[in-house]
Image (cartoon, rainbow, N blue to C red):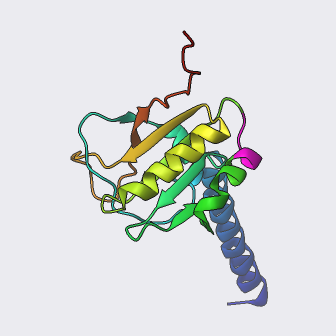
Amino acid sequence: MSWLETNYLARTKQTVWSAAFLAVVTIMLTAPRSAAQGMQEGINVELAPTTSAVPVPDADNRDALIITVTESGKLYFGIDAVAPDSVVERLTDRRSRTQNLYIKADARAPYASVVKVVDAARVAGVAGVILLTAQPKASQSGALVSPDGIEIELARRTPPATK
């Protein structure tokens, strides 16, 4: 085989590989993005199972307010550990008047720890509080599941009636 034929084959092979690479990159850039790309990094807990929750896909937004309560009662704002006394301050700094708070509490978490977070949400004036839950759904292995939750209504203190 002459030098000319070898050089031509090498250039053809390089062109084919370049075209294949460009095709793969184009497909990756134009393919619809999956929900996994919007999911937040977080602390893993065992959520309480329920059958009455509704989908809350906004909990996967990057700017969603999520407080996690672990089995031991430790609190995390996103992935950062937070002291119970500073939850109100952290919520006030990060929230807008229309933003919900998502509480991701471990099923075995102390009730008092969850109540502290709910009370902090009321004091900070968040728009709504949603308890994230686990759903007993039959899903395909490896499939992404939208978070589900139960919205709770916070009681507002009203001044006592005067007589």
Residue 45 quadrant: bottom left
Identify which residue, 140 or 132, lies in the foreground. Answer: 132
Residue 21 quadrant: bottom right
Q: Quadrant of the C terminus?
A: top right
Identify which residue, 26 or 101, lies in the foreground. Answer: 101
The residue lying at 66 percent from left, 41 percent from top is 124
The residue lying at 27 percent from left, 52 percent from top is 140
The residue lying at 23 percent from left, 45 percent from top is 137
In reply to whether residue 32 is colored magenta, the answer given is no
The residue lying at 61 percent from left, 66 percent from top is 83
Residue 152 quadrant: top left
Q: Is residue 2 above or below residue 102?
A: below
Identify which residue, 12 or 100, lies in the foreground. Answer: 100
Task: Give the image location of residue 130, x and y in percent.
Answer: 46, 39
Identify which residue, 91 or 51, lies in the foreground. Answer: 91
The reply to whether residue 35 is in sight is no
Image check: 133 left or right of 158?
left
Q: Quadrant of the N terminus?
A: bottom right
Q: Which residues are magenta?
A: 92-96
The reply to whether residue 47 is in sight is yes
Task: Give the image location of residue 5, x and y in percent.
Answer: 72, 82
Residue reaching furthest front? 163
Q: Is residue 99 above or below residue 81?
A: above
Task: Give the image location of residue 16, x and y in percent.
Answer: 65, 67
Task: Give the image location of residue 117, x and y in percent.
Answer: 52, 51
Image check: 85 left or right of 139?
right
Q: How many marks?
A: 0
